[in-house]
Amino acid sequence: MKKILNKNKIIIKLNDEHYSYDVYQMFNIYYQNLKIEFHEENYEYEVFIHEHEVVIVNDGQSWRFEISKEKHIKEEIRKGIFSYLREKTGKIFPWGTLIGIRPSKRAMTLLKEGKSIHEIVEFYHRTSLTSEEKAKLCIEVAENELKLMDEDRKKISVYIGMPYCPSKCLYCSFTSNPIGRKEKEVEEYIKTLLWEIKNISEEIKRLDLTIDTVYFGGGTPTAVNEQQFRQVMESIYENFITNFRIREFTVECGRPDSITYDKLLCMKEMAVNRISINPQTMNDYTLKSIGRTHDSEDIIKTFKMARELGHDNINMDLIIGLPGEGLNEVKKTCEEIKRLSPESITVHGLSIKRGSKLYEKLVVEKSLSISEQHEIVKMFKLVEEVSLKMNMKPYYMYRQKNMLGNMENIGYSISRSECVYNIAMIEDTQTIIAVGANGISKFLFDNGIIERLANNKDVRTYMDKVEEITEEKVKMLRKV
């Protein structure tokens, strides 16, 4: 059959749909910005999975590899297809076939079993063709997490969500609503949020649970006005901070165009001991192109203002792979961040979400371009080198689907400035109660089962159904 190539798609003919997920994931690593579909006609690739081998046919040429029933068959299929595409494209993806969001979890388990570094590195390579460098990163992250984890089941963490932002960034697909012209809705939302905070707090006290960490995120918590922000902060302080021995209270301040002196002062008054000021990049052209309404000088001024008010544990988020940015732009960002000297930096690989404007411009319209894979790897390496110069170590890590370059999100921190909430959240070490729109509560039970319960994403629906979902949340909490 004549193959009709579609530049927007990769079409695969597969003889056994039982393995479609595994085949899809491997092709998605190498052809991330293209749709991958399975059809019997007009296909570009044929994949035949037999009892002892897999055969891939493309452009009239066939490539085959053996699989063994004695090994994990799906694992072997993924490794074979990955190796074929690596050879065909010449692209190097250091995570290999790993697609899970918690790559360091395996290392943590193996460390607890007493395995050596060599044995763990060999395990990662044998099972998923992960590079030695990434395997050792998993080990280092796991070792640092183990020092900070607290698995006491009477301790929980609390997340508070503010689903508003000053404006929506190009890459964002989260439930974050541009706050302009939403004055009435914001007031109603805050009233509802305060009700939920109070009711959840009362139940936590009744059950004699201890709150370990509190994280106020979003959206952008500081997107609301000063009076509204203080109102929410006072409620959080009264209900979740006083009468508890809180280890950490983080506020994701986020964008400098929403941070004021009074909000920073309010945070100090309410016992916040960790804040995040997130530039994403220190290049003004990029900031404008991704929809930010501030420049790099605003970031510097806001950071210095926070320091003057006594904030001594500041995180800064960066995004690697933003449109129009290469090694030189990342280098400039790193130099500026190093001069400011925050206590931690969180590095995000750009994730191309279907619900974002970025996806439309990059994949559909093709009006934007991003760096090649080999350059993305170098960018991550550059940030790692800068973090080491700042005496930081990697302490938590997670991965997302459709991440540019198939890389990772990773937090670096100096000692004693790590975000403990991030570890509890990503490693499932504590029950986490989430309040606010789109908050997802996570309940850990003694039998090892984890159950999740989500508040509604839509703000209006959240407000309409808050009593119902809070009642369900309370029932779950009583079972923990």
Image (tube, rainbow, N blue to C red):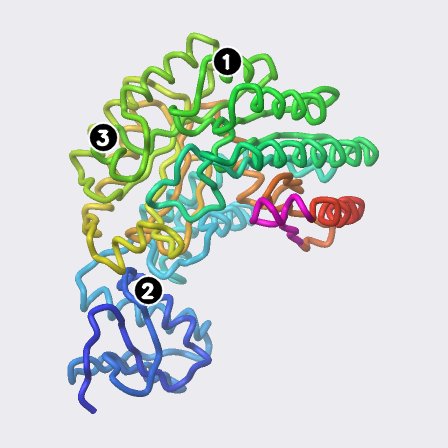
- Mark 3–mark 1 contact, CB under 8 Å? no
Establish if 60 lies above or below 467: below
- Picture coordinates of residue 457 (x, y %)? 56, 49
Q: Residues within 10 Å of mark 2 (few under 14, many from 20)?
A: some
Q: Which residue is mark 1?
A: 262
Establish if 86 lies above or below 371: below
Q: Secondary structure at mark 2?
A: helix
Q: Which residue is mark 3?
A: 283
Task: Identify the residue at the far top of this view.
Answer: 308
Q: Residues within 10 Å of mark 3 (few under 14, many from 20)?
A: some
Question: Which segment is the magenta one?
Answer: 450-464
Name which quarter of the figure residue 349 lies in: top left
Q: Which residue is mark 2?
A: 28
Q: Residues within 10 Å of mark 1 (few under 14, many from 20)?
A: few
Work out whether mark 3 precedes mark 2 in sequence or the reverse, and give the earlier one. 2
- Picture coordinates of residue 243 (x, y %)? 75, 20
